[in-house]
Image (cartoon, grey):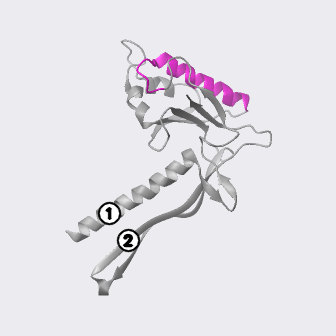
Amino acid sequence: KRTGRRLTQVRVAGRVVAEQLEKMLFQGGPTFGGLPIYGYTTHPNRNTSAFGTNGDWAEAAKTGENILADVQTMKTALHADRMYGPYMIYVPANAASKLDGDFKANSDKTIRQRVLEIDGIAGLRVADQLPSSHVIMVQMTQDVTCWVNGESLQTVQWDEYGGFELNFKAFAIGVPLVRADIQGRSGVYDMTD
């Protein structure tokens, strides 16, 4: 029993560390060496605007056509910054179920399916650590964003009291590197309220 409980604690600790890494990707982190760690919602050169008609994607009044128009707005702005894709769209957890609704009345497609049909959209993912009332579109190339990995997520174990007690610790070392070019053009679009 004790071993099973300990393994569960190790899994939970690993998940908590992974959630913190995801949070840093979207919301940035503390400074390191005197320099800020920017995320998708905090980089100073990211493209931004308010949501179009009917507010954010979780709103009951937001239609499939409204969401499609928001996606086209983001894509057009990224093209203006010479960022041509492929793109990943990240949505907060509160908007996830909306994407599985019908694109329009009596449609044979969901909103998610219709968005994924747009040229250049490589995927649409729910991001638990993305603050509600944000939708992010990112060009998925290393000149826009990459992950600087110091140490992959791992668990270390040590014993105490002659092996009668086992201790575990999960940790990782890494930071997101969100970039803009020398003209300040960015492949990140943050649509918010």
- Image position of 68 (left or right of 76): left
> Which image quarter: residue 108?
top left
Q: Is residue 43 above or below residue 71?
A: below
Q: Is residue 28 above or below residue 102?
A: below
Circle 1: element type:
helix
Marks 1/2: CA–CA distance: 9 Å
Labels 1 and 2: the sequence-earlier one: 1
Most foreground residue, 145 or 50 = 50
Give the crowd class for mark 2: few <14, some 14-19, many >=20 residues within 10 Å: some
**Residue at left 74%, top 37%?**
185
**Residue at left 50%, top 18%?**
54
The image position of residue 141, as x and y in percent, is 64, 44
Q: Is residue 18 above or below residue 157?
A: above
Most foreground residue, 84 or 81 = 81
Tag 1 near tag 2, CB within 8 Å = yes
Residue 153 visible? The answer is no
First to last magenta residue range: 57-81
Return the residue at label 2: 168
The image position of residue 190, as x and y in percent, is 60, 34
